[in-house]
Image: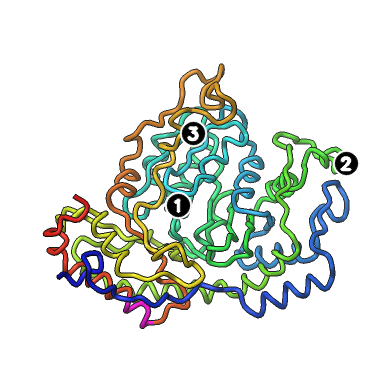
Amino acid sequence: MSELALLGGKPSRTTPLPAYQPIGEEEHAAANRVMKTGVLSKFLGSWANDFMGGPEVQAFEREWAEAFEARYAVAVNSCTSGLYAAIGAIGIEPNDEVIVSPYTMAASATAPLIFNAVPIFADIHPGTYCLDPVSIKARITSRTKAILVVHIFGQPADMDAIMAIARTHKLKVIEDCAQAPFATYKGRPVGTLGDIGVFSLNYHKHIHTGEGGVITTNDEDLAERCRLIRNHAEAVVEKKGVSNIVNMIGFNFRMGELEAAIGREQIKKGPTLIAQRRDNVRYLEERLSNLPGLAMPEVEAGAEHVYYVHALSYNAKATGIPRDTVFRALKAELPETALREGEGPLIAQGYVKPLYLAPMYQQLKAFGSNGFPFVSAARPTPPDYRKGLCPNVERAHFETVIFHELMRPPMTRNDLDDVAAAFHKVFRNLDDLKKAKVGS
């Protein structure tokens, strides 16, 4: 009998791996402080002293701006809300085009649709999985108004090249930093390199408030417009004296006082948590570096990766075994993680299917049933969303990427050794997988 768990052997480890739990006594005390005041929110949807929110929200914004070296920070209730506000703030209009990534959470690409603009997908760089500047440049048309860059997996994109393209074509740049807080590019924090940055505080991010997000910018006007969109802009602009009311249809994207108080404590913990991730990745990569057909993630020149996940590249030609078979064997060797019970081992393949292959883009249906805004009187020819549009992302999703979360704090050296042992066990028994014809 093979020693592989997939083929009837014993798993490499059965006891759960330690939970990623950055919430501690500091956050409990902060939440209790707010509860004792009885003020869980102070936002008013009218132009008044409380239009900007309560004391915790405003303190959180100041502290976030300082920590991330931005002039302004605007707290919102999610990164998705922040992306919507950012798209509105930069003045995107119907029939405009925004270049987006196909390899990211859906909201990063749907944000332009909220303002009736059209997402245009550029391909990713095959090593970093971020938008490829060469592909961005090839997608620019007379309708292009912005680039929405995603620092995917915690990896900063090639921002020098992207910003050069943006300056040449007079485009705005929004950075989706949901997976990359505290990442830097050539010494500067992501979220300050383009016109607007947007961060996530969702529960499975590096630091979190349960749900939440933050917008950063160095532009006073953009910060103000994001604040207006966050909080019922159309009800406020007249009394505030706003002259440019383009996209001043507001939402309720407001953050509560509890989330802000927790966020203030999480900011303090961020650098230490990131350092632990990087240290764990370095150790694990030393253990995995010589396995056949498995490549460690590339890091953009001048960038500091923060490893939301650890994305590996698998080459089936080097082993003669399909990725799915190796993935299933790895998964069978590994245990669940505490607080994530029911999800199985925190290892997966492919990440997200290229977004342009989703039903909305394939059927050209977003608002109503007539193809708007993909097709309209002003835009009779639909955008290109065919399969094969972005070969690098399709290869990554369907063939090469295996990613995991098994390097988060508080993973110890012993825990990481168990993860590495599972990989080594699978790769030294590749012949057993071939003979068993798993998945055939």
- Amino acid type at mark 3: Met
Whole-number angstrom distance, CA of label 2 to CA of label 3: 39 Å
Q: Quick one: label 1, few (<14), some, or many (20+) residues within 10 Å?
A: some
Of circles 1 and 3, the one toward us is 3
Magenta span includes 263 = no
Q: Residue at x 68, y 54 (%)?
A: 76
Residue 379 in the figure: left or right of residue 399? right
Q: Earlier in the sequence, mark 2 or mark 3?
A: 2
Q: Residue 173: x, y in percent?
A: 54, 45
Picture quarter with the N terminus: bottom left
Measuring from the top left, give residue 275's x and y in whole percent.
Answer: 47, 75
Q: Secondary structure at mark 2?
A: helix
- The main secondary structure of the magenta stretch is helix
Q: Which quarter of the figure has residue 193? A: bottom right
Q: Which residue is mark 2?
A: 239
Q: Which residues are magenta?
A: 413-418
> Which mark identifies residue 360?
3
Q: CA distance from mark 1 to mark 3?
A: 32 Å
Which sits earlier in the primary sequence, circle 1 or circle 3? Answer: 1
Q: Secondary structure at mark 1?
A: helix
